[in-house]
């Protein structure tokens, strides 16, 4: 997907999901060759962030899913109190975990 300004691509988004290492071997892979979530920002400076999350069994798919579900779980009480309707991620407030593990909010 591209965001184009004055005929020039300014933002390019590419999402690669690999079911198995043998699928599409020509697609980009993380530095260690195993599953990861990676964000690349081409520019000055070039920024590359790779996040590798795994569960207790070293399953990176499950670890990635666990990191994604946090926002959904954190929204349950907000959604339960909301009026009936259709909501998207922009409607749901961000809920930092501050205070839930002993640190108190100011």
Image (spheres, rainbow, N blue to C red):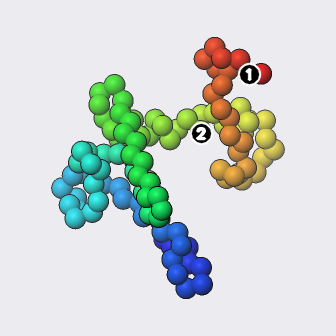
Q: Where's residue 16, x and y in %?
A: 36, 59
Q: Which residue is mark 1?
A: 105
Against 43, residue 55 (above or below) is: above
Q: Where's residue 68, x and y in %?
A: 50, 41
Q: Residue furthest bottom?
A: 7
Could you tell whether 103 is left or right of 23 in the image? Answer: right
Q: What residue lies at 40% left-to-right and 42% top-to-bottom?
A: 51
Against 2, residue 68 (above or below) is: above
- Give the CA distance from mark 1 to mark 2: 22 Å
Q: Are marks 1 and 2 in contact (CB under 8 Å)?
A: no
Could you tell whether 84 is left or right of 41 in the image? Answer: right
Q: Looking at the image, tell me whether mark 1 or mark 2 is earlier in sequence order.
A: 2
Question: Quarter holding the C terminus?
Answer: top right
Q: Where's residue 24, x and y in %?
A: 23, 62
Could you tell whether 53 is left or right of 8 in the image? Answer: left
Q: Where's residue 43, x and y in %?
A: 47, 64
Residue 11 marker = none
Q: What residue lies at 29% left-to-right and 31% top-to-bottom?
A: 58
Q: What residue lies at 52% left-to-right and 38% top-to-bottom?
A: 69
Q: Label 1's element?
A: loop
* Residue 19 visible in the shown view: no
Picture quadrant where residue 64 is located: top left
Q: Residue furthest left?
A: 22
Q: Label 2's element?
A: helix
Could you tell whether 93 is left or right of 3 in the image? Answer: right
* Residue 70 visible in the shown view: yes
Q: Which residue is mark 2?
A: 72
Q: Residue furthest top?
A: 102
Which-is-in-front pick, marks 1 and 2? 1
Q: What residue lies at 60% left-to-right and 34% top-to-bottom?
A: 73
């Amino acid at each position: 997907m591209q965001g184009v300004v004055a005929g020039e691509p300014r933002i390019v988004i590419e999402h690669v999901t690999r079911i198995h290492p043998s699928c599409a071997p020509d697609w980009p892979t993380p530095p260690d060759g195993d599953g990861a979530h990676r964000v690349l920002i081409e520019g000055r400076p070039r920024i590359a962030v790779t996040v590798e999350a795994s569960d207790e069994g070293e399953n990176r798919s499950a670890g990635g899913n666990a990191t994604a579900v946090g926002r959904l779980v954190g929204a349950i009480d907000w959604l339960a109190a909301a009026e009936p309707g259709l909501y998207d991620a922009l409607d749901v407030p961000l809920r930092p975990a501050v205070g839930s593990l002993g640190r108190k909010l100011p």
